[in-house]
Image (tube, rainbow, N blue to C red):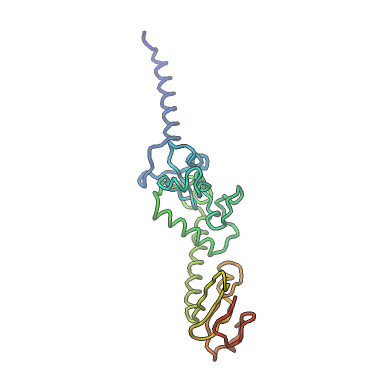
Amino acid sequence: MSVPKCAWVGMTTVSVAVVALLIKIYPTPFSSSQQRLFTIEELALYNGTDDALPILLGILGSVFDVTKGNSHYGMGGGYHHFAGRDASRAFVSGNFTGEGLTDSLRGLSSSEVKSVVDWRDFYFRSYTYVGKLVGRYYDSQGNPTKYLKGVEAKAARGAQLLEKQKKEEAKQPSCNSRWSQDEGGQVWCDVGFPRLVQRPQEIALTGKMSKRCACFTEDQLNNPGLEVYQGCDDLAKTCQV
């Protein structure tokens, strides 16, 4: 019995649609030469719950195949909450609840944004980059958005401030420190005397003021802004903290 031509056409159309759907949902193994654009819904399929699919994660809109780290990113793994989504913020916030698993970096300091970019660089070095997530960081054509450019500019600023802080603090040697359960914390100087001093770059980096322990010679002890540790003698070389 022959099949009418129109029936063959209909069957062919349905078959092509089914195959296209299967390819879309169950693509061939990813490689760095087969980069693609993902929607949020598509990326969610690769969350480690289906053994037949690779495990993917996004960070700053870049998507990586982390299947080789299945023990970490698969079901029951310590990093499973990153699988199948872009949870960029959680890489520095440590908030793995529903609200914390977001790609928004709004309100983070320049040093925190730099840390997220550093994490993205880690994935580029350690795993296979497979594509881009359409949304906050990449548009529907795969072009970087203003938001991504802003994030990278803020991270670059953070790197500059960290380098400046490093050079400034190198001028005044840091204290040695140790901690033990019996003695608690101690700071000491091989040369000079321990003092607490403000870290002026910290406000721009983290939005908060902080102090560090540095060693000052006796002729520097009258410099402004130096703080003696509570309970420590002015000329003691070791202080309990």
Seen at 40% across and 45% down, the residue is 35
Q: Is residue 101 above or below residue 154?
A: above
Residue at the front extreme of this rendering? 182
Q: Where in the figure is residue 183, as x and y percent of width and height? A: 57, 74
Q: Is residue 79 above or below residue 49?
A: below
Seen at 60% across and 49% down, the residue is 97
The quadrant the N terminus occupies is top left
Q: Is residue 25 left or right of residue 228?
A: left
The quadrant the C terminus occupies is bottom right
Q: Where in the figure is residue 5, as x and y percent of width and height? A: 38, 15
Residue at the bottom extreme of this rendering? 219
Residue at the left extreme of this rendering? 33
Seen at 41% across and 24% down, the residue is 15
Q: Is residue 94 above or below residue 164?
A: above
Residue 205: name its quadrant: bottom right
Q: Is residue 63 left or right of residue 107?
A: left
Q: Where in the figure is residue 62, as x and y percent of width and height? A: 46, 50
